[in-house]
Amino acid sequence: MSRSDRVLADAEVVLRRHSDRGQSLSMRARQRRNAGLMRKVKYAFWAVLAVLLASTVAGFVMPLGTTGVMIVLGMMIAALLLIALLPSEPRVRTESLAETELAALPLKTEIWLENQRKALPAPAITLVDSIGVKLEALAPQLERLNPQEPAAQEVRRLLADHLPELVTGYQSIPQPLRREERNGRVPEKQLVDGLSVIDAEITRMSEQLASGDLDKLATQNRFLELKYQEAKELGQ
């Protein structure tokens, strides 16, 4: 069995073993969506109230009449439609990850990954869930890390550069070709292999941040650079 085949098999095992983690990640996504819906309800309430107050004040100055009432109703409907069109969950653009503050980067990366789930194969989704759980644990550690530290730059490169390049490189390949061998490689297996490496790397980073070994975190990346180069070649 090749290394990539083993990675795929291991990913299936992880899916069964860590289903609770995946549920936790999905639960956080649902919580964000529910919070977004509640914000929209509040916006709708205040918008309707503002229109009613404005129309009441205008009515004291000049009777609204039938036409005025229709205008007020139209403004309410327009406001409600506009609010309904707002996304319930924040959308994170790929290019915005590079501009995100370090402390907020794990959450933004988790949201970005959640938005990519539908375009990924099942074994990759397993690893996405695992990465998302580890990003949650990494977030408080980054709050205490100086963004100018070399270690901080390594974290940023992993989350804002290498991970998006791996996923978008896979997504750029036409659907029928994703399981076909291409230059000796199968894109779907490359994706799973790369996500597995990134998953392990986040674990290592978290452990070294916890131990305060920032110098080791900033320099131990030669092997990973080779793996990330494969990610860049995915969409080529």
Image (spheres, rainbow, N blue to C red):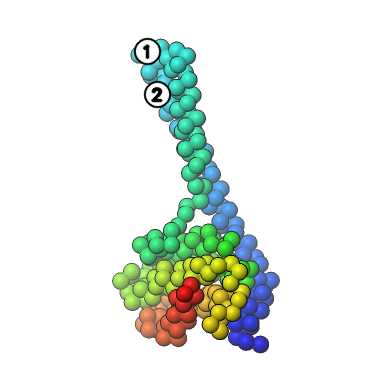
Residue found 42% across the figure and 28% down from its top: 50
Against 42, residue 208 (above or below) is: below
Residue 196 shows in this picture: no
Q: CA distance from mark 1 to mark 2?
A: 12 Å
Asked whether disc 1 touches disc 2, contact meaning CB atoms under 8 Å apart, the reply is: no
10 Å neighbourhood of mark 1: few (<14), some, or many (≥20)? few
Q: Out of 65 and 151, give the one closest to the viewer.
A: 65
Question: Disc 2 residue type?
Answer: Ala
Q: Residue furthest bottom?
A: 1
**Quadrant of residue 158 in the image?**
bottom left
Residue hosting label 2: 54
Q: How many marks?
A: 2
Residue hosting label 1: 62
Q: Out of 44 and 231, give the one closest to the viewer.
A: 231
The percent coordinates of residue 151 (x first, y second) are: 37, 76
Against 62, residue 92 (above or below) is: below
Is disc 2 placed on a helix, strand or loop?
helix
Residue found 50% across the figure and 34% down from its top: 80
* 204 relative to 219 in the view: left or right: right
* 174 relative to 221 in the view: left or right: right
Against 70, residue 217 (above or below) is: below
10 Å neighbourhood of mark 2: few (<14), some, or many (≥20)? few
Against 110, residue 225 (above or below) is: below
Residue found 46% across the figure and 68% down from its top: 164
Is disc 1 placed on a helix, strand or loop?
loop
Whichever of callouts 1 and 2 sits on the residue coming sooner in the sequence is 2
Question: Disc 1 residue type?
Answer: Met
Q: Looking at the figure, which quarter contains the N terminus?
A: bottom right
The percent coordinates of residue 105 (x first, y second) are: 42, 64
Residue 66 shows in this picture: yes
**Quadrant of residue 155 in the image?**
bottom left
The percent coordinates of residue 225 (x first, y second) are: 43, 82
